[in-house]
Image (tube, grey):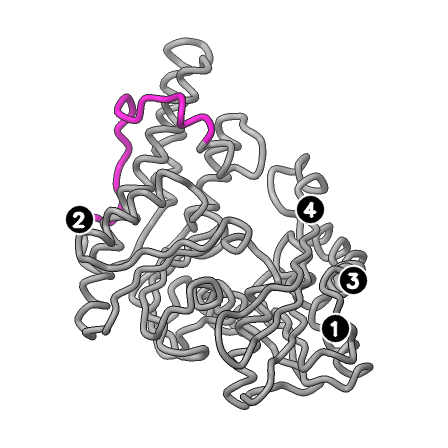
Amino acid sequence: MTQPLILLGLESSCDDTAAAILRIPTTGAAEILSSVVFGQTALHSDFGGVVPEIAARAHTEKLDLCVRDALAQSGVALRDLDAVAVTAGPGLIGGVIAGVMCAKGIAAGANLPLIGVNHLAGHALTPRLTDQIAYPYLMLLVSGGHCQFLIVRGPDDFTRLGGTIDDAPGEAFDKTARLLGLPQPGGPAVEHEARKGDAKRFRFPRPLLDRPGCDLSFSGLKTALLRARDQVIAEKSGLTPQDRADLCAGFQAAVSDVLAQKTARALVAYLAENPATPVLAVAGGVAANASIRAGLERTAAEVSARFIAPPLALCTDNAAMIAYAGAELFMTGHHDDMTLAARPRWPLDRTSPAMLGSGKKGAKA
């Protein structure tokens, strides 16, 4: 690369509409010139979760405004761009389609290369955007819809060591919040309550720790919390604020313990490759949980691996990570044409068996 690259990134895979302008210099760290995110929490708050039809409509209404604001904040014009990168999957198909069609229109109108990016790759490559770490590194991708351990060897080279066989941790946090009458999004609400609770009062199970490997399960943990809640209600004819806090603390401790111990197993497999500088990175919305992050940091320290957790704004869904993943692909010579399709399913590791089953549209994860 003989001159800096400037890319526009678009993200619309779930309930955040985002656009960002990223500058990749010939040497040194990438620079986020702007990052605009329009959230949809208020639109979905009455439904206890994301409603795909509402999300898709909101993306359609907001994408062009996001792009306008991102360009204005960065001081970059369309003519200054070198490429457009967009999340092409996996995700809620209506939102992904909205993003892909918007990117195609911009690319065609401005005569720019188009790059379809796997949303999960955006998360997995974020530590290279923030900390310029070298390949290979171990990534724990932990969010509302995904949870998997990946050895990241390149922008399109991932090996999955394990992942959830049912609910993702973020999904379990959201369901726990609903069971306890807490607001959405559930992760921050449960964490807030857990700070006031006694994690030892309710001893919840640690699923799959009695089995080898790095696979995880959180559905049974949610069921255990439901039963504990019902037992307290039966005994007291209701839940006190302290009961709710103790349930949250016990649930959070169980998730943290499972992730830490499974991460220790994944580190063993990763370290067998003898990386020059071992790195454990974590990304995704659940990485914002302070208790979970602290447990992972201790696990990395036990094997002298560097621990990296990007800033919160780059852990949750954003377009800067999509622009960066697109830039890495672009520098390898990859780009797409106007046949780029939106994909509801798109596993990063295309050689390993599907974790959650497969259908006509391909592997889910």
Of label 3 and label 4, which has the lower sequence position? Answer: 4
- Front-most of 174 and 198? 198
Residue sitting at x 26%, y 37%: 205
* CA distance for labels 2 and 1: 46 Å
Of label 2 and label 1, which has the lower sequence position? Answer: 1
Residue on which the image places disc 1: 101
Residue on which the image places disc 4: 40
Judge whether 71 appears above or below 252 on screen: below
Residue on which the image places disc 2: 210
Choose mark 1 or mark 3, whichever is in front: 3
The answer to whether marks 3 and 2 mark residues whose Cβ atoms lie closer than 8 Å is no
Neighbourhood count class around disc 1 (C-alpha, 10 Å): few under 14, some 14–19, many 20 upward: some
What mark, if any, has residue 72 been given in the picture? 3
Where's residue 7, x and y in %?
A: 65, 75
- The answer to whether 122 appears left or right of 287 in the picture is right
Label 3 is placed on what type of residue?
Ala
Neighbourhood count class around disc 3 (C-alpha, 10 Å): few under 14, some 14–19, many 20 upward: few
* CA distance for labels 4 and 1: 20 Å
Where's residue 249, x and y in %?
A: 36, 28
Q: Which residues are magenta?
A: 192-209
Of label 1 and label 3, which has the lower sequence position? Answer: 3
Residue sitting at x 60%, y 85%: 3
Choose mark 3 or mark 4, whichever is in front: 3
Q: Secondary structure at mark 4?
A: loop
Label 2 is placed on what type of residue?
Asp
* CA distance for labels 1 and 3: 21 Å
Q: Secondary structure at mark 2?
A: loop
Q: Quadrant of residue 71?
A: bottom right
Where's residue 196, x and y in %?
A: 40, 21
* CA distance for labels 3 and 4: 22 Å
